[in-house]
Amino acid sequence: TTSGIPNIYELTFDGSTANAYANGTNVGTQTGISPGTTLTTSQQLTCVNGGANTFIEYEILFYNTNLSTSQRQQVEGYLAWKWGLVSSLPSTHPFYKIPTNTVNPFTPKLLSGLSLWLDAADGSTITLSGSSVTQWNDKSGSNNNASLLSGSGAVYTNPTSGLSFGGSTGY
């Protein structure tokens, strides 16, 4: 991945094996992992961020179940088309040429297990103090809102620029 260019990152865990993906490509697998306090039996986290010196977050999706390959690819396609990252997907990806919403409109809620959905494109989910984010509301329906715990807060300027995290900010 190139620094400063948005990427789609995913981490899946099925109870014993963790897989890391970048832009729809598996970039690492770790087996023999036991669930502990930070990992439960089956989870998936997907997000789009911009990298570089400042961490920019555009969208975060967390599923409390491991998605199938086709479901994972639906999410990748949804994010790639929404955020203009289609060219980052492998040319063999099923949604490289065809958007996920071509036949049926896709939203992350269509897949079971969605327990966190933070979407910087939806300004109505962001509470500001000036340009600093004090809360980022969860669209999954699970009420897992991200509230500022420490630091000055991420900076939000508009729905297409994501949330800019710099220094030590905790949510």
Image: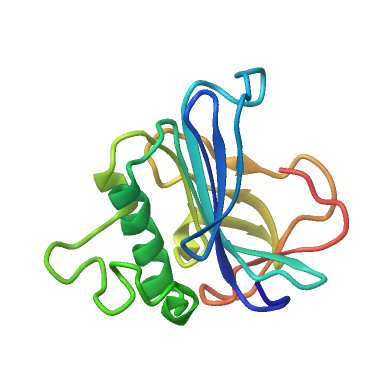
Image position of 32 with respect to 103: above or below: above
Residue occupying the point 48% across, 40% down: 44
- 111, above or below 14, in the image: below
54 or 154: nearer the viewer: 54
Residue 82 placed where, x, y %?
A: 39, 72
Task: Judge whether 35 appears above or below 130 on screen.
Answer: above
Please, which residue is most extreme toward the left here? 103
By what rule are the colours in the image chosen? rainbow
- In the rendered image, the quadrant that contains the C terminus is top right
| Residue at position x 88%, y 59% in the image | 167
Q: Give the image location of residue 146, x and y in percent.
A: 61, 43
Tell whether 8 sits left or right of 30: left
**Residue 159 image point, x, y percent:** 51, 72
> Does 144 sit above or below residue 79?
above
Residue 152 figure quarter = bottom right
Left or right placement of residue 121 versus residue 32 in this view:
left
